[in-house]
Image (cartoon, rainbow, N blue to C red):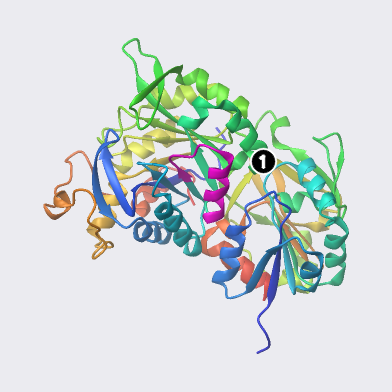
Amino acid sequence: MYRSAFRIIPRLDIKGPNLVKGINLEGLRVLGKPEDFARYYYEQGADELIYQDVVASLYGRNSLHEIISKTAKEIFIPLTVGGGIRSLADISNVLRAGADKVSINTAAHKNQSLISTASKMFGKSTIVVAIEAIKQSNGAYMAFTDNGRNQTSKDVILWAKKVQELGAGEILLTSVDQDGIGKGMDSKLIQEVCNAVTIPIVAHGGIGNPKQVLEIAKEIPVSGVAISSILHYQAISMNINLDSFKDEGNVDFLKSNHIKSQIQVSSINEIKNLLKKNKIQVR
Amino acid sequence: MGKTMHISIIDYKMSNMFSIKNALDSLGYSSEITSNEKKILSSDGSVLPGVGSFPEAMNHLHKLNLVEVIKEFVISGKPFMGICLGLQLLFNRSEEFESYKGLGIIDGTVEGLSKYPTIDRVPHVGWNTVKINSLTKQNLSYRSSKIRLDNNEYYYFVHSYFVNPENKDDIFTTTKYGGIEFCSSIARDNVFASQFHPEKSGAKGIKLLREFFN
């Protein structure tokens, strides 16, 4: 298996002006200002960042663009933005704000030519297709949209092949079943998708401790992992987000200092050190 | 000291130029995204960015009358940097696209990563190290000798093609991926161009931009 350095990519779910975190992509909690977390992760050696607008309404996109442009002015690693991107104009606007890549899910299902046209227009490497997978009772994985709420009736493996053919430069693969519970990633799902395509895969959903990252990096030719909870809670423990709360969402859990027991709070450095020790190449 | 250096970022409607502008702004340079011939030629330094396909990029450069402008700028001796597709466009031709003609500033060709069976993931996306070509190190021009690269430093790559310079002295660094070693940057006279993205390579990348344009 040849690979460039294994990528550790903090994923920041954004609602309005806030960084939020959900469980199984539901039940949002406010954690702070995304740009504060982004700056901290950049200094910690994050390889890229993902901003996911979890509400993605047509209205109120200004705050997302504002967050992107603030981030892009001080953080010089690739930034992928997803959520609510439906047209070439949406892509162009997000890139103009300072994003380097866009991640598209729902619109790719509704309009496959968006992927092929965007890939030609903005370059393959700019277009990431996000696939949200949920395991079915027969063991197959089905692709979902809208944070796992809507079924597409498409098989994940076939869909992954299709988006590669359409011109996607990368796949961001989320296991909705595993997301936010910290019990580890769905290695079967990731392996199957890696086998099916030759474009890079970034896996997301389920990391609860650094050891789980190591297991995935060792076993599967995946290019990197997107992580949220364990990094966010570590960042919070460093008090990076004092004074940055807005009146949106539920902040009570933060005050109560309650962190789910499966989550082992860890920094990017700690994760990379563990990988390095085990001869996985990291930056 | 004298006036602020003004850098043009050549806009040929094909790429994300904003991150380069952000990076140059952070260094205190004045910079402008432009396809205006006069503005490019009167700038103190220039960047040719680029993401996307080689033939389409050349079509855009021709349509905007920028082919001769770029050649003229390079001859002027002022610092000129190509990034990613902006490196590939400097070459004679791209093998993959019916031998499509490039700017022909550097002799050599552009090849595809996917024709190598040992490479299992294309595009090559992510952080990889560079190795300095010992041939070049001795003969670096004044401009590129200011870039303080170290062997095994990580930079951010995202590409499906790479350049193969005819004159091996033009190779500044090489990078290993999937069992091959390709040219990851070139340096000649006032020109430096890289396959990786300095503007997306964190503090090391920003440092490279500063050293080259200073």
| Quadrant including the N terminus of chain A | top right
Task: Please name whichever residue, B112 or A215, is drawn nearer the observer in this view of the structure.
Answer: B112
Please count the marks in the image: 1
Q: Quadrant of residue A209?
A: top left
- Does residue B153 appear anywhere in the picture? no
- Residue at 63%, 64% (x, y): give it: B149
Q: Residue at x 25, y 56 (%)?
A: A236
Q: From which residue to which does the magenta span run?
A: A81-97
Check residue A88 for magenta coloring: yes
Locate residue B43, reporting x and y percent.
75, 73
> What amino acid type is highlighted by mark number 1?
Met
What residue is shown with label 1? A121
Q: What residue is at 76 percent from the left and 49 percent from the top? A: B88
Viewed as shown, does residue A146 lie left or right of B208?
Answer: left
Q: Is residue B156 rendered magenta in the image?
A: no
* B162 or B8, nearer to the observer: B8
Query: Which SS class for mark 1?
Result: helix
Write down the chain letter for disc 1: A
